[in-house]
Image (cartoon, rainbow, N blue to C red):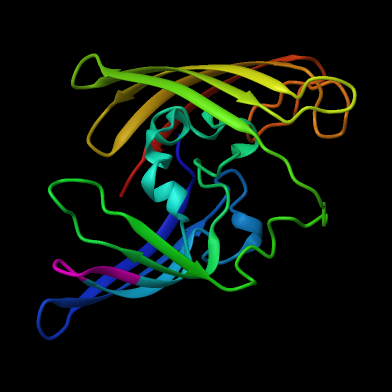
Amino acid sequence: MQGNRFGLRGSEDLSGAWKALFVLENGFVVESGKLGQGGSEFGRQAFVGLSSDAYGKLTLGRQYDSVVDMVGALESGSQWAGYTGAHPGDLGNMNNRNRVNNAVKYTSPNFGGLPPPVVMLFDETAFVNLNPNSFAGTATFNNAEVNFKYQLTPMLLAGVAYQYTHGPSMPAGSGARCHQVNVGADYFLSKRTDVYLIGAWQHASGYDSTNTKAVAAINGVTPSNTQNQVVTTVGIRHKF
């Protein structure tokens, strides 16, 4: 449901209303113990900064991009459906597949209970690993999602979501279209431990970016050889 992680975070009160802060967060593969995020020691997050209740927060380093901060939490893949519930290929990065290196991020204080706006600046090396095959060109993808979750009891949460993705037209025909349905249930054994069952079904049609017939490709798993794919995930999560 969430990526495996271990990290450290801390803050220190400075003079006045300011605080110094840091976050170091490591991702790993629980089955083997290998590092995640391409083998980076702190591949999830690594930044330092200053914060103030009155003036907001300024952070520098490897961070989540503004899409993750502003709208990522609305996606079923971020709420309850896990990475297989994200949009195909995590287009739009709402499920936080890619972080931003060398980023300077400013998060404003809350105003009237509204979510704080986020501004990011970064240098030319920030996205250096996002296109390892040096592909060139322009493509536009349209994503839409309807996400519903309900707390059935204090211990049991259920969710269902529908996603639609439409790629650009190709010479052989219309662009790839993906319809995906996610369903899931999460049962809390305690405040820190829960077990979950998640299912995802995807149907693809049209032609993909290689100008061949699109196949179903649920995020984070090997693409299907056909237009349909089903993935089921059962797991346990413990937070400490």
* Residue 111 image offset from top left, x and y in percent: 16, 53
* Residue 208 image offset from top left, x and y in percent: 80, 28
- Tell me: residue 106, above or below residue 173: below
- Tell me: residue 211, above or below residue 138: above
Residue pushed farthest bottom? 15
Q: Is residue 224 left or right of residue 239?
A: right
Q: Is residue 19 magenta?
A: no
- Tell me: residue 145, above or below residue 34: above
* Residue 56 image offset from top left, x and y in percent: 23, 66
- Please provide the residue range marked out in magenta: 52-58
Quadrant for the N terminus, please.
top left
- Tell me: residue 46, above or below residue 214: below
Q: Residue at x 48, y 69 (%)?
A: 121
Residue pushed farthest left? 16
Closest to the observer, 43 or 172: 172
Q: Residue at x 27, y 27 (%)?
A: 189
Q: Is residue 90 left or right of residue 104?
A: right
Q: Is residue 57 magenta?
A: yes
Image quarter of residue 78: top left
Number of residue marks: 0
* Residue 75 image offset from top left, x and y in percent: 43, 32
Q: Residue at x 60, y 56 (%)?
A: 37
Closest to the observer, 89 or 35: 89
